[in-house]
């Protein structure tokens, strides 16, 4: 399941449905990304821009690559765009595999690729206005470990 | 053909897209970026390091040497910050 949406979603419900629809899995890993505001860097919102047609295609390709590479039974990615508030769910990755190692590694692989190769751009909204989040070199390095 | 700009690139240019009709000698995406930069100083400055940007043709990420013939929608994509 690949979903790019401006609407909120329930990651728990997502995971339970995905698990119920699968057969033969012995392990499921879910990762949920959450909008964070901290005392040293308080934000009022996170605004995500997206290129939906490309995002759906790229996420589906990443999912297919993860399934083949780690022998997953299935994988799902849900990613929001638009204006999100602290505590809101940004995105979720779910992997289903026969055993835990593949499920964990598949989820880590998908997360690392999502950071650098999915066409989303974050802006932090603070009381001073909006500021684009800079791409991080450690995200490139994390993605690089899979190639 | 349409060219889309995203995120801070869109902001720097003050527009999300351009409708363009490049000349015949503009054959690849790399040629197109070169041609677009030559006619727009703001884009030229914003793309001072062109290697930072990914390019897409009809909503598929492709390499700069991809031909543009027949393309409907090209996009110039600044470094992505999803996840």
Image (spheres, coloured by chain):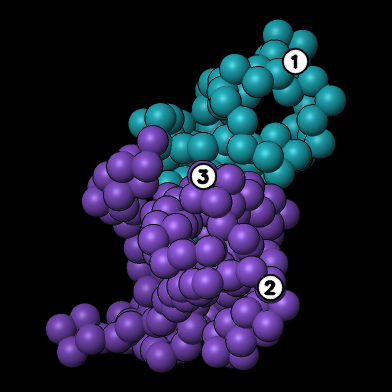
Chain colours: A purple, B cyan
The chain ID associated with circle 2 is A
Q: Which badge, 2 or 3, comes first in the chain's sequence? A: 2
Q: Which mark is residue B23?
A: 1
Q: Which of B61 and A2 is in front in this view?
A: A2
Of residues A102 and B55, the one nearer the viewer is: A102
| Badge count | 3
Tell me if A75 is positioned left or right of B48 in this view.
right
In the picture, the disc for residue A22 is 2
Which dot marks residue A69?
3
Q: In this view, does B48 lie above or below A123?
A: above
Residue that sits furthest to the right in the current view: B70
For the residues marked 2 and 1, what is the alpha-carbon distance in whole angstroms? 52 Å
| Label 2 environment density (alpha carbons within 10 Å; few <14, some 14–19, many ≥20) | few
How packed mark 1 is, by other alpha carbons closer than 10 Å (few <14, some 14-19, many 20 or more), is few
Whether residue B79 is visible, yes or no, is yes
Return the x and y of residue A17 as percentages of the image width and height. Answer: 67, 84
Chain letter, disc 3 residue: A
Q: What element carries label 2?
A: loop
Q: Quarter of the image containing the C terminus of chain A?
A: top left
Instruction: Specify whether disc 2 shares its chain with disc 3.
Output: yes
Q: Residue at x 75, y 15 (%)?
A: B23
Foreground mark, 2 or 1, reads 2
The image shows residue A83 at horizontal and vertical percentages of: 53, 80
């Amino acid at each position: 399941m690949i979903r790019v949406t401006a609407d909120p979603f329930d990651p728990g419900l997502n995971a339970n449905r995905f698990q119920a629809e699968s057969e033969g899995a012995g392990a499921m890993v879910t990762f949920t990304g959450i909008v964070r505001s901290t005392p040293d860097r308080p934000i009022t919102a996170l605004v995500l821009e997206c290129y939906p047609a490309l995002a759906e295609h790229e996420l589906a390709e990443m999912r297919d690559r993860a399934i083949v590479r780690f022998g997953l039974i299935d994988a799902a990615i849900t990613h929001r765009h638009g204006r999100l508030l602290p505590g809101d769910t940004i995105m979720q990755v779910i992997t289903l595999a026969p055993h835990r190692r593949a499920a964990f590694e598949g989820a880590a692989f998908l997360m690392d690729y999502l950071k650098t190769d999915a066409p989303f751009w974050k802006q932090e909204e603070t009381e001073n206005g909006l500021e684009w989040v800079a791409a991080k070199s450690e995200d490139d390095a994390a993605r690089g470990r899979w190639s | 053909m349409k060219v889309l700009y995203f995120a801070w690139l869109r902001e720097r240019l003050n527009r999300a897209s351009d409708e363009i009709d490049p000349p015949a000698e503009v054959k690849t995406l790399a040629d197109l970026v070169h041609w677009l930069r030559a006619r727009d100083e703001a884009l030229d400055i914003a793309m001072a390091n062109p290697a930072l940007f990914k390019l897409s043709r009809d909503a598929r990420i492709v390499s700069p040497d991809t031909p543009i013939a027949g393309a409907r929608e090209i996009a110039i994509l600044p470094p992505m910050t999803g996840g």
